[in-house]
Every structure is written in C-alpha cells, then in structure tokens.
Image: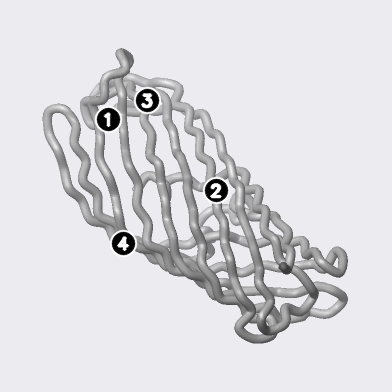
C-alpha cells in the first residue's frame, strides 16, 4: 500500500486530554493533523526517462477514549489520509496524476506512568481496519488507473507527556514504532489488471526516528 511507502517528514499532532493523572471515568477527545511534502527525481523502470516527482500527504485523525482505570485509556480512532503524486509512473503508464485516499477506523489502548516533576511516559497500542481508493489520470485528464486496497494493521508506539497546566499536556511520540500490516489490493490499468496481497512487519526505527516525531497536546473533558 502506497501509504506505508511514505514516511512523513513533518507530523503535527493535535490531541485533547486533561490532568496529570487521568481518573477512572474521564472522557478524552483527541485529534491529529499531519502533512508532508517531498520532491525528488523518479525514473520509469521500463523507459529511460527521469522526471521531478512531487508528493503530498495529509492525515486527519480523531479519537475518543475513556479512562477505564487511573492512567489507562481505551477508545476508538477514525483516520482519513489523502495522498497525491504528480509525474507518477506505473509499469508502462505515466506520467500520471496519482491519488490514494486512505481511511481507517479502530481501537486503542494507552497506559501512562509518572516519571516525576510533571513528566509522564506512555505506551499505546492500536488495531485498525483500513482501506483506500486509488486513481491515476493521464495528461488529458482521462482515468487510466484505478483500484482499491483493504486490510488491517496493529501499531505500538511510545511517547512522553509534560504537564503544562492543570488541564493540558504537551506530548512527543514516535508513531509507528512497530507495526504489523496485512493488505490486499485490486488495481486495474490499461491494458491489464492485477491483484496483490502483502504482509508487512516494520519499524520506524529502521530510519531516522527524528523524521517521524509527533508533537501534540491533550484535554480531558
């Protein structure tokens, strides 16, 4: 799936949560906004041709959770992530204006532990059902590539929270520190179509983790 081929260069996370310790029964509302942009040279593997490829990716995330016991939160997450590429090549097709609209929904479990002096470490695990719709248009605007993907993913990552005030935390985390993903895809292009299944186990530590940091804050309702 194209989404996991792109490591976001900049992630801005907006999450809403509350006190230094989340009491049982607290309701937590959260969200995340991320954006990445990249330009690089891409060579068509079938034709000796190089082009400047530009990619844009954004992620919109909202979550609702409840403290099932002190400092332990369980909830649901919804995600939408549009991904677009100019001068995209696929087999003998290209250059194309390519898009991949990703969506996911799932559950999460987060545990906080005090480090002292208003600092807290947390770990979060989540499980998603995910899918996407794929489209590719040529220079005349005609659709020559289409398809869809679906699957599931398990994600584990850590973070640190700092109590800025009575109601707010500042958070820094490493998204997708470890994830397991299964996906199946069905892609149609002129003059053929293809089906594919993938199983991936990966970690953001395989690259520089500093390029994959999430920064956010939380508010307790």
In whole angstroms, how far apart are the C-alphas of marks 1 and 2? 33 Å
Mark 2 touches mark 4? (CB < 8 Å): no
Mark 1 or mark 3, whichever is nearer to me = 3
Q: Point out which mark residue 97 bears.
A: 3
Q: Position of residue 8 (x, y in %)?
A: 55, 46
Judge from the rendering whether residue 38 lies leftward or rightward of residue 173; answer left or right: left
SS for dot 1: loop
Q: Quadrant of the C terminus?
A: bottom right
Q: Residues within 10 Å of mark 4 (few under 14, many from 20)?
A: some
In whole angstroms, how far apart are the C-alphas of marks 1 and 3? 18 Å
Total number of numbered discs in the rendering: 4
Judge from the rendering whether residue 9 lies leftward or rightward of residue 26; answer left or right: left
SS for dot 4: strand
In whole angstroms, how far apart are the C-alphas of marks 4 and 1? 26 Å
In whole angstroms, how far apart are the C-alphas of marks 3 and 2? 22 Å
Q: Residue at horizontal 40%, vertical 20%?
A: 51
- Say whether disc 3 or disc 2 marks the residue closer to the N-terminus: 2
SS for dot 3: strand
In whole angstroms, how far apart are the C-alphas of marks 3 and 4? 26 Å
User: Which residue in the structure is indicated by mark 2?
Assistant: 60
Q: Residues within 10 Å of mark 1 (few under 14, many from 20)?
A: few
Mark 4 or mark 1, whichever is nearer to me = 4
Residue 194 lies in quadrant: top left
- Say whether disc 4 or disc 1 marks the residue closer to the N-terminus: 1
Q: Judge whether 130 appears above or below 117 on screen.
A: above
Report the residue that reaches farthest toward the left: 191
Q: Residue at horizontal 31%, vertical 61%?
A: 182
Q: How is the image coloured?
A: one colour
User: Which residue in the structure is indicated by mark 1?
Assistant: 45
Q: Position of residue 159 (x, y in %)?
A: 66, 67
Q: Judge whether 2 appears above or below 198 on screen.
A: above
């Amino acid at each position: 799936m194209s989404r996991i081929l792109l490591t976001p260069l900049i992630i801005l996370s907006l999450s809403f949560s509350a006190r230094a310790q989340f009491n049982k029964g607290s309701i937590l509302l959260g969200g995340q906004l991320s954006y990445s942009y990249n330009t690089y040279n891409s060579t068509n593997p079938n034709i000796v041709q190089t082009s400047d490829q530009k990619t844009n990716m954004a992620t919109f995330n909202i979550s609702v959770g409840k403290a099932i016991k002190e400092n332990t939160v369980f909830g649901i997450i919804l995600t939408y992530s549009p991904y677009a590429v100019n001068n995209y090549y696929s087999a003998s097709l290209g250059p194309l204006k390519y898009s991949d609209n990703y969506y996911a929904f799932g559950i999460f479990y987060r545990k906080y532990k005090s480090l002292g002096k208003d600092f807290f470490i947390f770990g979060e695990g989540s499980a998603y059902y995910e899918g996407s719709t794929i489209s590719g248009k040529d220079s005349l605007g005609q659709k020559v590539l289409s398809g869809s993907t679906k699957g599931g993913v398990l994600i584990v990552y850590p973070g640190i929270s700092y109590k800025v005030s009575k109601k707010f935390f500042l958070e820094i985390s490493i998204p997708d520190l470890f994830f397991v993903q299964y996906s199946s895809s069905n892609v149609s292009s002129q003059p053929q179509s293809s089906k594919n299944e993938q199983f991936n186990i990966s970690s953001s530590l395989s690259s520089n983790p500093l390029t994959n940091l999430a920064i956010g804050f939380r508010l307790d309702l």
